[in-house]
Image (spheres, grey):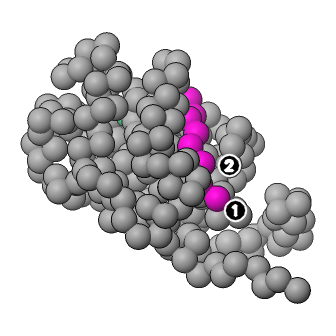
Amino acid sequence: MKAFVLMIIGVCFPFATFAKEKSSDLQFDSLPYAFNALEPHIDAKTMEIHYTRHHRGYYDNLLNAMQDSSLKTKTLPQIFSQVSKLAPAIRNNAGGHYNHTLFWKVMSPKGGGAPEGMLAEKINATFGSFDKFKEEFKAAALSRFGSGWAWLCVGDDGSLFISSTPNQDNPLMDVSEKRGTPILGLDVWEHAYYLKYQNQRGSYIDAFWNVVNWPEVNARFISLVGNKKPPVKK
Ligand code: MN
């Protein structure tokens, strides 16, 4: 229904739609910590190549692919919501840029431990316990064949769910099996772990828990559901 309404708006106001919203997510943010800051869990060489070559490559290719395009005035989530109709270069590079921007921010040298507050309660209510959540997330990350991502997402109804997407897709895309807004993402492309972990993706996933920035993930959760009050019973 939402997609239909958006389509009607797009047909009626093709030049006005979202035109005022200048995309603010089209910047290449600096890494919030040094390349070696996540050692020993993620090594400095991997971080450096990952950030300066892989992420930068997606970003530069995205800007090239969007040159002279009306997409420049849209936010990445707006682009993702209609990505099935767009060129593969947009899908791959917009996804690559968005996914990595999120990934760097949900990790921290002071990370690890367990979530607190609203997110902790929601994780316990949804998955049974934090350990059960980690098991399910690891299974999603391990079972992604080839390259892709594992996600913790918030659905439109405020629910939490775990999913996985191939390549540089993400759960905001209209091509995604399960749609929602990711609040935590783990890159399981080999470029994210091969130098240190070789084929041991499971060891890389286990190490990831030591660097997860839970306050950041909790803040993202609250920004999505914090203002939603439970429906009033009549
Ligand atoms: Mn990557």
Q: Is residue 101 visible?
A: no
The residue most toward the top is 199
Q: Position of residue 4 (x, y in %)?
A: 88, 59
Q: Residue at x 57, y 34 (%)?
A: 165
Residue 196 appears anywhere in the view: yes
Magenta-tinted stretch: 159-168
- Which residue corresponds to the image point at 28% horizontal and 24% vertical from the top-left? 203
Q: Give the quarter of the image for residue 36.
A: top left
Question: Label 1, on which residue?
Answer: 156
Query: Per the image, is 75 magenta?
Result: no
Alpha carbon separation for disc pair 1 and 2: 8 Å
Number of numbered discs on residues: 2
Q: Nearer the viewer, residue 30 or 212?
A: 212
The residue carrying mark 2 has its beta carbon less than 8 Å from ligand 1 = no
Q: Residue at x 61, y 34 (%)?
A: 88
Q: Residue at x 52, y 24 (%)?
A: 144
Three-letter residue code for mark 2:
Arg
**Residue type of the residue flagged with mark 1:** Asp
Dominant secondary structure of the magenta stretch? strand
Label 1 or label 2, whichever comes before in sequence order:
1
Relative vertical location of residue 165 with respect to residue 32 in this rendering, above or below: above
Q: Is residue 24 left or right of residue 84?
A: left
Q: Is residue 66 above or below residue 175?
A: below
Q: Which mark is residue 179?
A: 2
Tag 1–tag 2 contact (CB < 8 Å): yes
- Packing grade of label 2 (10 A; few <14, some 14-19, many >=20) is some
